[in-house]
Amino acid sequence: MKVLKFGGTSVGSVESVLTLKQIVEHEAQKQPVVIVVSALGGITDKLLATAQLAKHGNEHWKNDFDAIADRHHRMINTIITDDQAREELSQTVDALLEQLRSIYFGVFLIHDLSEKTQNAIVSYGERLSSQIVATLITGAQWFDACQFIKTERENEKHKLDTELTNNLVRKTFVDLPRISLVPGFISRDKNTDEITNLGRGGSDYTAAIIAAALDAEVLEIWTDVDGFMTADPRVIKTAYTINELSYIEAMELCNFGAKVIYPPTIYPFV
Ligand code: ADP
Ligand code: ASP
Ligand code: MG
């Protein structure tokens, strides 16, 4: 089996999400695949910025929330052509958006944004995108990452409980569907049940955790560059793709700031 992760850039536009569908459906003809997706490109930043507006009592949070909702509605209306599927998906998405609006309203009323609330807010990016992609891909089965990606609090940080998570991942995917669809990034605290996450860029890590736990043949991280490069091509125009890297070299590159892969992503493989 293969694990394929698609980042925000791959679910950012109608064109890219349709390419994702083609890649996944092609791969799934050869072997079972687990697909991990990020939030629609730029949505995570927007969710956080809107939370700050609400916290500071700024009425504009409503406009920003409407823009977030609109972005998802437009995506659904463009890419889901089957009427019944679109109707069902819209109901799911609208229910999620309604919850999100209520949380923002609470933050706005009491001018308080705890870490717990912020984590709940930011989780909606992947919760929404994964539902959309699961409907788009024929035959995909949606899985709730919070049921098997478990964290615990250590030194004021949320840290993955690797053993528990590995066991839960193996149990969840014991009968592997042809196409499984998992929201990246999000997790749940194993003690308090509160929604947590693996840190910014953490969808890469979700995919790596699943790939390692299921002993996948391959983990593919699809993004807007062709691989690890000698430098960030947005900054250094002459940067070029590195053909081969050991896990250790990849980890070093990430730890020294190559923002192409979230650093802990390599841990499950070394
Ligand atoms: P995604 O949304 O798919 O997770 P990211 O933005 O997290 O994508 O990562 C891809 C981006 O990482 C590239 O567009 C590139 O600008 C940047 N990047 C930074 N350093 C490197 C590097 N050493 N090699 C390749 N890309 C890099
Ligand atoms: N959506 C999250 C972020 O922007 C996680 C990810 O994209 O990997 O940080
Ligand atoms: Mg990324």
Image (cartoon, rainbow, N blue to C red):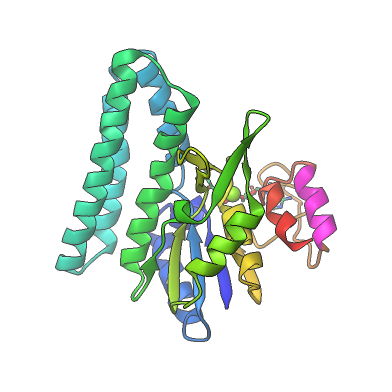
In the drawing, does residue 103 fall left or right of residue 9?
left
Q: Nearer the viewer, residue 52 or 148?
A: 148
Whether residue 249 is visible: yes
Q: Classify the position of the C terminus by image quarter.
A: bottom right
* Residue 239 point in image, percent of width and height: 76, 52
> Is 187 above or below relative to 56?
below
* Residue in view at x 66 percent, y 48 percent: 262
Q: Does the magenta-highlighted stretch encompass residue 253?
A: yes
* Residue 181 point in image, percent of width and height: 43, 65
* Residue in view at x 39 percent, y 17 percent: 55
Residue 20: quadrant of the picture: bottom left
Query: Which stretch appears magenta?
Result: 247-255
Q: Residue furthest front?
A: 191
Q: Residue furthest bottom?
A: 30
> Is 198 above or below relative to 22?
above
Residue 165: quadrant of the picture: bottom right
Q: Classify the position of the N terminus by image quarter.
A: bottom right
Whether residue 198 is visible: no
Q: Does the magenta-highlighted stretch encompass residue 270?
A: no
In the drawing, does residue 33 fall left or right of residue 213?
left
* Residue in view at x 49 percent, y 51 percent: 8
In the drawing, does residue 119 fall left or right of residue 76?
right
* Residue in view at x 76 percent, y 51 percent: 238
Q: Main secondary structure of the magenta part?
A: helix
Q: Nearer the viewer, residue 194 or 237?
A: 194
